[in-house]
Amino acid sequence: MALLEVEDLAVTFQRKGTRPVHAVDGVSFTVAEGQVVGLVGESGCGKSVTSLALMGLLAKRGVKVGGRALFEGNDLLTMPNSSLRDMRGSEMAMIFQDPLSSLNPVVPIGLQVTEVLKRHRGMKGEPAQKEAADLLDRVGIPDPRRRLKEYPHQLSGGMRQRALIAMAVACKPRLLIADEPTTALDVTIQAQILELLKELVAQEGTALIMITHDLGVVAGLCDEINVMYAGRVVEAAARRPLFANPTHPYSVGLLGSIPRLDAPKGEKLRPIPGSVRDNIAWVDGCAFAPRCAHRTDECLDGPPALVQTYTGHSYRCVNPFTSDEVEAAAASAPILRAPAIVDPSTETDGER
Amino acid sequence: MSTKTERIDRLAELTARTDEGGHGLWYEAFRRLRRSPLAITGAVIIAIFVLIAILAPWLAPYDPASQLWLSEIRGSEGFIPGPRPENWLGVDGLGRDELSRLIIGSRQSLLVGVVATLLGFTVGAILGGLSGAFLGMFGKPGRWIDSVLMRFNDMALAVPSLLLAISVATILGQGLVTVMIAVGVTQVPVFARLLRGSMLAQSHSDYVLASTALGVRKKRIVLNHILPNSMSPVLVQATLSLATAIIEAAGLSFLGLGGADASNPEWGVMLADSQQYLATNLRLAVYPAVAIIITALGFTLLGEAMREALDPKLRK
Amino acid sequence: MSLLSVRDLKVHFPIKRGALFDRTVGHVYAVDGVSLDVEQGQTYGLVGESGCGKSTLGRAVLRLVDVTAGQVLFDGTDLASLGAEPMRKERRRLQMVFQDPMSSLDPRQNVESILSEGLAAHGMIGDRKARRAHIQQTLDAVGLPSGALSRYPHEFSGGQRQRIGIARALVLKPDVIIADEPVSALDVSVQAQVINLLEELQDDLGLTYLVIAHDLAVVRHISDTIGVMYLGGIVEEAPSDVLYVSPRHPYTKALMSAVPVPDPEVEDTRERVLLKGDLPSPANPPSGCRFHTRCPWRQETRCDTERPELTLVAEGHKVACHWAAEIEAGQIQPNSEAVVAAAEVAA
């Protein structure tokens, strides 16, 4: 049984006097033990709302949640609040995008970490302090004992995010959800944080749901990737097959429109025309149809069904890209080889 | 292209056209205001108040100054008649029709409220506007000008309206003008600080930087960009200040500085007069008090609704 | 002669403290001695992380912040020493495109007003009909419909607002456009539209660009020459492809290896240089080479005492590092902790 099975998750925001907004419109995916799953999409695709729904962090009023989210067989969406609170922090934990607003500015870091320890592991006093310091050390914060007394604003962005990660892994959760954890950070700091996440996941066997808009991040981190558009998963595949054979026109479009570091200068980008405002509702057809290069009449008949291939690659499209087309597009884009950092001739095993 | 794809293109066109667009932010705010129950309630109250004030001479059943029923009171050992067919709200201590006094009294309140707020708004806006503009856009010399202007502001802030009213009264004598000046001057600092802060904040925004980068002259930036974008909180404040002005004016009149004479009733004076009858005829205090409260409430409701409608965070 | 040159530019912001009298207790060395040249019709990309001073540099070139020292030579004139009114007139030829399209447009101005303002400020095209025609043409050039004229910024999408910003700069027929993070506030799929637009406009109108961005992939794509900034100074400058294939400065190497690439093959096989620690504060920069506190190739001598100069190491390729030649020749190896081999990570 998978650790987490999300089936047809739907989140609708309804305020009086306005049209209902289907932020999440039927999302399904699974997360196995120790697996890293990516939810990729641009703003408005519903990926963040999905994670909030899973953690039970959405407001009660004006929000309707449908579908099921089975964590080891128990439905998170219908669980009583008290059980959910017990699970949060100990079985499931979340890391948010902006570390400054996610940390309480008037409480020292140490206290915020020991709060988690006290709540779920019943630790107090000196043992809790020591454990907190150990955690901060584990996530790579230098001089952890001193940091325990410091306030969030005294730490840099990268340090704050590490502190948040420390709080999240304090109770060795089975599932970690990271919602754009590095978007607000500089690229060299981002690399450090991603390394840290990789290590933690590998060492503890924690499953990770990585939510991001950056395809480069998922290319290096995730085992399975779900591409989301307008509240639904439009393509899901393992890492290599997704990048080697993107099938859904949105995935293809996305990959063709982002500038790659290793592409030579002068390569033309192929943007996706229009914007998310041009979407139509899923009930009327494929939401992506107005912007799609592969649009046919069938696309407006109704929502495209999910197609599963035997390789575990699935997509929602009636006229997907074939691997030939993708190859043809790729052929015209030569890639520059990355430079070697260490001169291989002088490298010795001992040094590493 | 077949009909289905044409359908989608038309759909996109349609969704684009239903939003006719071309509407500025004032219009959008106004539309929001129209739908707000708070605004409607406030506007209705104000409308009624203003209508009564304007049509007062025709609405009042009797002359507010004539003590028509004085003899009746004297005759019945000080018993003051309450609401009855010929006097809907009864009669006051000197035999004058209460309803007429209330109606005519509204004119005074309206006049004082509006003039005092206008005074405060104008002087305050000039003071605050100049300060904010110079502080935000003109560097070192600007900061100096701001300091000087704000000292004037502090002077106005330091004087409580009562003391000011008394001082003005010793020069000009008691009367409406005294009250107007006193209340008006105390309103000045609020507007000045508000507009100054608003303009300062706007002068640091990106679009001001963008206009500077375009090569637009500073004066134009201040007048065409900073000022219009700084007005919302000031307009909200003006509405709310009207409410306080009415209450403060009534207060000053209550204390005897309004100098409203017998022929020109005023709600504050009516309150003052009612003091001696509190034990026996509480209604004589209740009527003017309720009138003051409801009128002030109307302006407050509208002002709060305006604040919500103009709040940029609540915009799309 | 380059169209736009910056010579030893310094922008130091004083830090003021004190309740009654403002005392200057220190400085933020936002830009600390930068020189660069932008050739006509070319794109110079300035890249770096937060605190490196690239945005400040862009604004200093346009005198939107005060210049502490140095020269900004535009077509022979030193902008840094011009008086207020002459500078205002020069602005017509150097325009800026801002990062946040929402905040850089006055919400109370409709598009027509936004586009006419610049023209009015410089007394261009007095005739109303001609002015309208010119504005229409500019709208076409950036891909906005003519119906946009009467609309207000909040009625447009992010990408469209950025186009309005570009149109506003373009309508003055400038020579140089400085783009400060032109696409970072936009959705990924819209970024490409705006990038393509900027490239087309450059081809059609012969514009010269200074593009400031933190996204290395975007900068690589659009720039001819790239300058990498760290803590107020340029550490390496090279043509775009050369910079990727053979970065010489340790910081550039780290930066390049940190940028995620949407390709599992590449991600799995590349080596990464992981820097330790955080960026130092620009108010308190390290002595000597600004980068020495985090540099995996740091040596015992010179790195913490002497600030390296930007020197030419190959055609069009400059590096500011004392040991660049030795590193290139393989004589100096990086700190073993810092370099992470791909094989290790995938385990």
Image (cartoon, coloured by chain):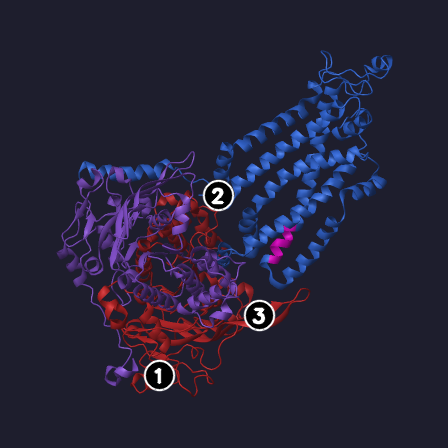
Which segment is the magenta one?
B128-135
* Cβ atoms under marks 2 and 1 closer than 8 Å: no
Q: Colour of chain B?
A: blue
Neighbourhood count class around disc 2 (C-alpha, 10 Å): few under 14, some 14–19, many 20 upward: few
Q: Is residue B132 magenta?
A: yes
Amino acid type, callout 1: Ala
Q: Could you tell me which chain the residue with mark 3 belongs to? A: C
User: Comparing marks 3 and 2, which lies closer to the viewer?
Assistant: 2
Q: Share a chain, discs 1 and 3?
A: yes
Q: Which residue is mark 2?
A: B314
Task: Identify the element where label 2 is drawn.
Answer: helix
Q: Share a chain, discs 3 and 2?
A: no
Chain letter, red = C
Task: Identify the element where label 3 is drawn.
Answer: strand
Q: Which mark is residue C324?
A: 1
Neighbourhood count class around disc 3 (C-alpha, 10 Å): few under 14, some 14–19, many 20 upward: some
